[in-house]
Amino acid sequence: MARPIKATKILYGADAVRFAEKAERVERLSQEQRTENYRRLKERIVHAKNHIEFCW
């Protein structure tokens, strides 16, 4: 059975404002950047699979 999620802190004042501002400034990736990231991720997965021994 999963553990319950603990309550998180509530932000007030300057901390809340800073959090909201950072949430608005999220970097948006172009489709080309997403495609390149996906391609590199797949390469890393193949590389990792070649170097990991699985004991079934």
Image (cartoon, rainbow, N blue to C red):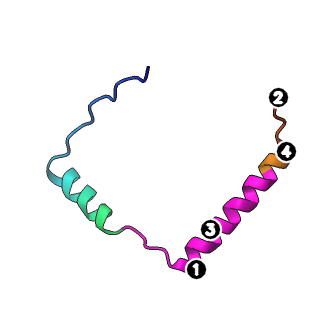
Type of residue at label 2? Answer: Cys
Q: Are marks 4 and 2 in contact (CB under 8 Å)?
A: no
**Which residue occupies 20% across, 52% down?**
16
Label 4 sits on residue: 51
Residue range (magenta)? 26-47
Q: Nearer the viewer, residue 26 or 52?
A: 52
Label 3 sits on residue: 37
Type of residue at label 3? Answer: Asn
Q: Residue furthest left?
A: 13
Residue 20 relative to residue 43: left or right: left
**Numbered disc 1: secondary structure:** helix
Q: Earlier in the sequence, mark 3 or mark 4?
A: 3
Q: Could you tell me how far apart the alpha carbons at marks 3 and 2 are, in whole angstroms?
A: 30 Å
**Which residue occupies 78% across, 55% down?**
46
Q: Could you tell me how far apart the alpha carbons at marks 3 and 4 are, in whole angstroms?
A: 21 Å
Vertical side of 17 occupied by 1: above or below: above
Which quadrant of the view contains residue 22? Answer: bottom left
Q: Are marks 4 and 1 in contact (CB under 8 Å)?
A: no
Q: Position of residue 55 (x, y in %)?
A: 82, 28
**Which residue occupies 62% across, 68% down?**
37
**Which residue occupies 61% across, 73% down?**
35
Label 1 sits on residue: 32
Q: Are marks 3 and 4 in contact (CB under 8 Å)?
A: no
Which quadrant of the view contains residue 14? Answer: bottom left
**Numbered disc 2: secondary structure:** loop
Q: Quadrant of the N terminus?
A: top left
Type of residue at label 1? Answer: Glu
Q: Position of residue 23 (x, y in %)?
A: 31, 61
Q: Which mark is residue 55?
A: 2
Q: Which mark is residue 4?
A: none
